Image (cartoon, helix red, strand yellow):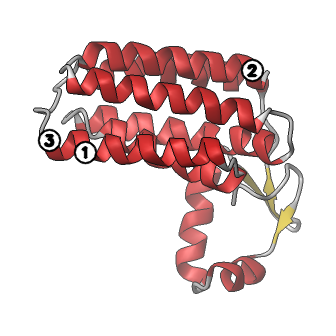
Amino acid sequence: MLDYPPGERLSEVALAEEFGMSRTPLRRVLARLEDEGLLQSVHGVGTIVTDVDLDELAQVYRLRMELMVLVTSLDPVVLTPELIDEFRVMNARAEALRQAPSPRDFALLDRDMFLQLLELTENRPLRDASERLYFRTARIWLQAITASDIDLENEAEVYCRETADILTALRNGNLDAIGHMRRAHISMSFARMR
């Protein structure tokens, strides 16, 4: 869904074929995306990909920044070697991305890293709210990367440093540092995107 530009009309039949699913579950997905403000259904016209409201986007990014600090302080999980190893894998993927930058690989790594960071809290409402806001803003970031509006090589380098710092903080048991690092990363990413 992130590949469709604002204003594009979507056909349920074409989407069902593209994603290999029947129209009933697809309608549920489209309804959820409409609830998220990513789509708009217009009677007699169809489903249209919405454009971005920059003021609202800035508000969402500011909220995401604050929630990230909470992810590492509210109901934190006990750090285990297995959990730390998952972040080691993220760092290895970031290193590979730095060597061969790819918009698709970057998008997948960013999503997976975000979801892995949510594993640092047991607070379910916080995780749900954070996830919802992440996916609300992810399409804008991904559009900027795929449209070459952002220097992918530089972004991969920045991301690689961040994952290495997060891994170091985890090994030291410093969850607070991780929340603040990720908050800064979100802030700087939004500034570069603007």
Query: Which amino acid, by three-letter code, is at mark 2?
Result: Arg
Asked if labels 1 and 3 touch by Cβ distance under 8 angstroms, the answer is yes
Q: Which disc number belongs to residue 85?
A: 1
> Which of the 4 image quadrants contains residue 131?
top left
* Residue toward you, 19 or 96: 96
In percent of width and height, residue 112 lies at 45, 49
N-term mark: 1 or 2: 1
Left or right: where does residue 60 sit relative to residue 50? left
Instruction: Describe residue 126's horizontal placement relative to residue 104 as left or right.
Output: left
Q: Which residue is mark 2?
A: 192
Point 80% across, 33% down: residue: 150
Identify the residue shown where x is 85% and y is 49%.
6
Q: Are there few (<14), some (14-19), or many (20+) residues within 10 Å of tag 2? A: few
Mark-to-mark CA distance, 1 and 2 = 30 Å
Image x and y of residue 15, in percent = 72, 76
The residue tagged 3 is: 81
Residue drawn where x is 73% and y is 36% of the image:
153
The image shows residue 147 at horizontal and vertical percentages of 86, 45
| Mark 3 residue element | helix
Residue 130: x %, y % from top left: 42, 34
Asked whether 147 or 89 is in front, the reply is: 89
Residue at far front of view: 99
